[in-house]
Image: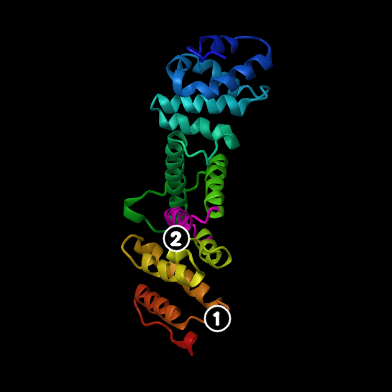
Amino acid sequence: PAPLTSSVGLLAMLEESETQIKVHALQKLERVVPDFWAEISESLPDIEALYEDEAFPQRRLAALVASKVYYYLGEYADALVFALGAETLFNVDEGSEYVDTLLAKAIDEYCKQHQQRYEAATGSQEEGGSSTAAEAPIDRRLIDLVDRMVESSLERRAYQMVMGLALEARRTDLIERIILLCDAKPGELEHDASTIKMLEYCFGLFSSAVVPRSFRATLIALLVTIYRGLPAPEYLGLARCLAQAGDAAGGAPDPSPLI
């Protein structure tokens, strides 16, 4: 077939009454957004209306098309809103600039909201942050999107990237999972090779200025718990963590766990 030179014909199909014609048009439009986003942007109200129509069977596809158009318009906030509406049609493994840009924006928002919840729960205020929005529920679609990215990264054993997200989001459950995964499914990097190696890496990372002091004690306590649960004792690492925990608490560590 001859290459498409305009999206006008496809956009006209969105005005048809038959649902299948509209679905066909959206399927074609989704593939040509990078070439004809300026033309397609003029029909955004029609595309958004299809997404908002709960009786329309391809609402998620309409959301994906709208998201891509907003991305090319430079309206990243709106692009993310519709990417969330696209749900699993937004492919976190696509590797395109579009997906990577919106993933970064989604992760920033996810971490910000989790930080607010952590601050509210612990009574801390990191770097002048506000907890006024801490009680607002996190959009389930945002959680699902980030969870899909996390699971994909863990499957590829890209532990360092997920560790950064877990730290930013104050997700100690995810941090613990990554550390233990390094024994079950070792990664390629040196500190991903085993749980012991990752514990050593995390100790250095958690003790640095990169981690807010208000969160540091919680992280060191987590490392102590993991060290104590190891099948083979690792006394040196445990001792370093206990010493660090004592410094964070303003006192000497309790030596009894090593006796």
Mark 1: secondary structure: loop
Comparing 182 with 203, the one in front is 182
91 drawn magenta: no
- Please name whichever residue, 49 or 71, is drawn nearer the observer in this view of the structure: 71
Quick one: which residue is furthest to the front in this view? 1
Residue drawn at x 33%, y 65% is 208
Prevalent SS, magenta region: helix
The residue pinned by badge 2 equals 122
Q: Position of residue 51 (x, y in %)?
A: 59, 24
| Residue 169 located within the stretch drawn in magenta | yes
The image quarter in which residue 120 lies: bottom left
The mark nearer the N terminus, 1 or 2, is 2
Q: Locate residue 89: give its quadrant.
A: top right
Q: Among all residues in the image, which is located at the extreme bottom?
A: 259
Query: Which span is picked out in magenta?
Result: 156-173
Q: Give the residue pinned by disc 1.
A: 232
Say whether residue 218 is visible. no
Q: How is the image coloured?
A: rainbow
Q: Looking at the image, is 34 positioned above or below residue 178?
A: above
Q: Above or below — where is 148 with respect to 1?
A: below
Residue for point 34% across, 76% down = 247
- Pointer 1 local density, CA inside 10 Å: few below 14, some 14–19, many at least 20: few
| Disc 2 residue type (three-letter) | Thr
Tell me if label 1 and label 2 are in contact, CB under 8 Å.
no
x 48%, y 39%: residue: 95
